[in-house]
Amino acid sequence: MKHRPLALLGALLLSTGLVACSSSGDDPDVGGPTVLDVWLMRDSVSDAFQKEFEAGFEKAHPEIDVRIQIQEWEGIGEKVTAALASNDAPDVIEVGNTQVAQYAQSGGLTDFTGRVDDLDGDFWLDGLAEPGAWDGKQYGIPYYAANRVVIYRTDLFRKAGVDAAAIKTRDQWLAATEKLDGDGVQGIYLPGQNWFALAGFIWDEGGDLALQEGGGWKGGLDSPEATRAMEFYKRLQALGKGPKDSDESRPLQAEVVAKGQIAQVIATPGGANVIAQNNPELKGKLGFFPIPGKTADKPGAVFTGGSDLIVPAVAKHQDEAYTFVKELTGDAWQTKLALAMSYVPNKTTLATAVASDPGAAAMAVGAANGHATPNTPQWAAVEAKNPIKDYMTAVLTGRDAKTEAAKASRSITTALNSGS
């Protein structure tokens, strides 16, 4: 999943010398193919897929010579910012879906609003399309998605007489987890600060982490909807021994699940591979199902991580860049990418493309009810201190939920309005 904290921006970045490494100066003589520079992120594509796509694209468009450079996520915010401010930017850049607003605010991106229909935008996943828009215009084109599912131990479910396929609602999920919990087995491993999971429950209830109000933003953790979501989270978290004061990375939850008798964990499907690597005895004993919703007719809401493609306004090859974006985000290559990388395709109409991959298939079901964090460049300031995590720990350790929710909401409000 490509959700990364956004880096601090400002004039300092422009003095670091981090400029784009464009090959536009290498264009051949008039009459030869146009060199198109593209930045894709580490683990966005495999070597095999990259070679297949480049060959297929250049065969279909012999007038374009694609040169893909793989970038690292570490420090990419500063690098993209510098590229957008330079006169030598790449033609296409992959960015995290929640980062688009930050770059669009500077006015450095090409506006694709008039081409949304041509790109089948009516079928885009909301969790990619909505954060790709800013101020009523579409700058980011959905590329691929990933979201959390429930990874479960098939042997422990079988022993407890629990049918994972029958779990369609949160109430059924809670009842099944209660049945699994006991006799040396944890019903679920859920760290107290998994705020992505809490966000999903809040969206299920009809609330949000923050809402626009009177030209500004207001934190939403003190709403009745968020209160109900936190109550459910508390009941679910109590059916295991997950720490109340840390998140999925402290300790790494996949390693914890590998070592213990733990029936379930909330993670992206790739977590199953990590679990099996840490405990080979669990290979073939891990299954997946979408996070259940409040009602059986709709899966649980999930945070949609993933990437969008952007084109810098200063890119020299705008038409060729659009051709590249249209091809890579089109049905044919999206299907191939999903199968190669176990990602969710960018359109709801392509969900069946990953039907043969159990983890990706469960992920695709949840992606249909995907959401993103509040679409504002200031959201990075919230995550930097993350009062949501502090709020969750406070409630789980017995402090007054109403007081703590109001405190956290005030912190979110302050952070989101600090740049306005």
Image (cartoon, rainbow, N blue to C red):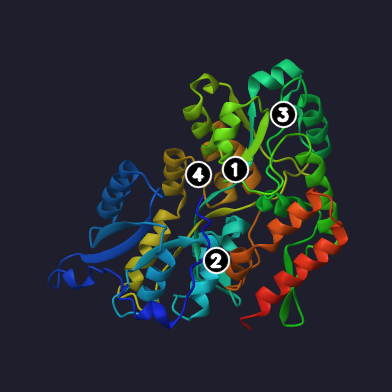
Q: Amino acid at mark 4?
A: Tyr
**Sequence-earlier tag: 4 or 2:** 2
Which numbered disc flags the more N-terminal residue, 3 or 1? 3
Callout 4: helix, strand or loop? loop
Name the N-terminal-most of marks 3 and 4. 3
CB under 8 Å between discs 1 and 2: no
> Looking at the rendering, which quadrant does residue 217 occupy?
bottom right
Q: Position of residue 377 (x, y in %)?
A: 57, 73
Q: Amino acid at mark 3?
A: Gln
**Secondary element type, mark 3:** loop
Residue 115 picture location, percent across and down: 49, 69
User: Depth-wise, is mark 3 or mark 4 nearer the camera?
Assistant: 3
Which residue is identified by label 2?
Answer: 132
Residue type at the position of mark 1: Ala
Point 38% across, 52% down: residue = 42
The answer, for residue 359, to whether it is visible in the render is no
Categorize mark 1 by other alpha carbons within 10 Å: few (<14), some (14-19), many (20+). many
Mark 2 against mark 3, which lies toward the viewer? 3
Q: Point out the tag, 1 or 2, that comes first from the N-terminus.
A: 2
User: Badge 4: how crowded within 10 Å, few (<14), some, or many (20+)?
Assistant: many
Label 3 CA crowd tier, 10 Å (few <14, some 14–19, many 20+):
many
- Mark 3 vs mark 4, CA separation in Å: 29 Å
Which residue is label 1 attached to? 364
The residue located at (64%, 42%) in the rendering is: 365
Who comes first in sequence, dot 1 or dot 4? 4
Label pair 3/4, CB-CB below 8 angstroms:
no
Per the rendering, the mark at residue 186 is 3
User: Label 1's element?
Assistant: helix
User: Hey, what amino acid is under mark 2?
Assistant: Gly
